Image: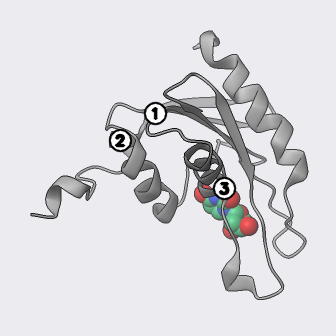
Amino acid sequence: MSDDRDLVDAARRVRANAHAPYSRYHVGAAVRGQSGAIYTGANVENASYGLALCAERSAVAAAISAGEKRISGVAVVTATSPPAAPCGMCRQVLAEFGDDDLPVALTNDAGERTDTTLGALLPHAFRSGDLT
Ligand code: THU
């Protein structure tokens, strides 16, 4: 899908800002809000290892903090081949703001790309509607 090149490029750029001195695993993520604007996030690690913040949740927090209510696209960039997918915690956070058909582009710095959806990554997601 070439029409989301801006989203992938944004994720690639922000990856350079990852604070990952412990894992040395740099991740960049970008999400598109309902307005069409793009928000980015990199992983932010801590000397207290368990406090690491993933790039995807960092990007979602930026989008929601800016006033977005829904997310219509996600791109993730790592060095992994084949391209790595978001961790389970990030999948659940994406499910709060995106539908099952939310497109998720997994890419790496070698230019490989896998296109998937949130529903494929997290079937039967737990959502607010389940709180009955
Ligand atoms: N990481 C992410 O940013 N996103 C993921 O979906 C998986 C893991 C980060 C967390 C940590 O800084 C590093 O990658 C290694 O786990």
Q: Identify the coloring.
A: one colour
Q: Tell me if mark 2 has few (under 14), some (14-19) or many (20+) residues whose alpha carbon lies within 10 angstroms of its own.
A: few
Q: What is the count of numbered marks?
A: 3
Q: Amino acid at mark 3?
A: Ser
Q: Amino acid at mark 1?
A: Thr
The residue indicated by pointer 3 is: 58
Q: Nearer the viewer, residue 106 or 6?
A: 6
The residue indicated by pointer 1 is: 116
Q: Quadrant of the N terminus?
A: top right
Left or right, 98 with respect to 27, comes to left
Report helix, strand or loop for mark 2: helix
Disc 3 beta carbon < 8 A from ligand 1? yes
Q: Residue furthest bottom?
A: 48
User: In the image, what residue occupies the spot 72% across and 20% down?
Assistant: 6
Q: Residue 122: give x, y in percent of width and height.
A: 35, 51
Q: Amino acid at mark 2?
A: Ala
Q: Nearer the viewer, residue 36 or 65?
A: 65
The residue indicated by pointer 2 is: 120
**Which of the marked residues, 3 or 1, is nearer the chain's N terminus?**
3
**Dots 3, 2 in contact, CB < 8 A:** no
Mark 2 vs mark 1, CA separation in Å: 7 Å
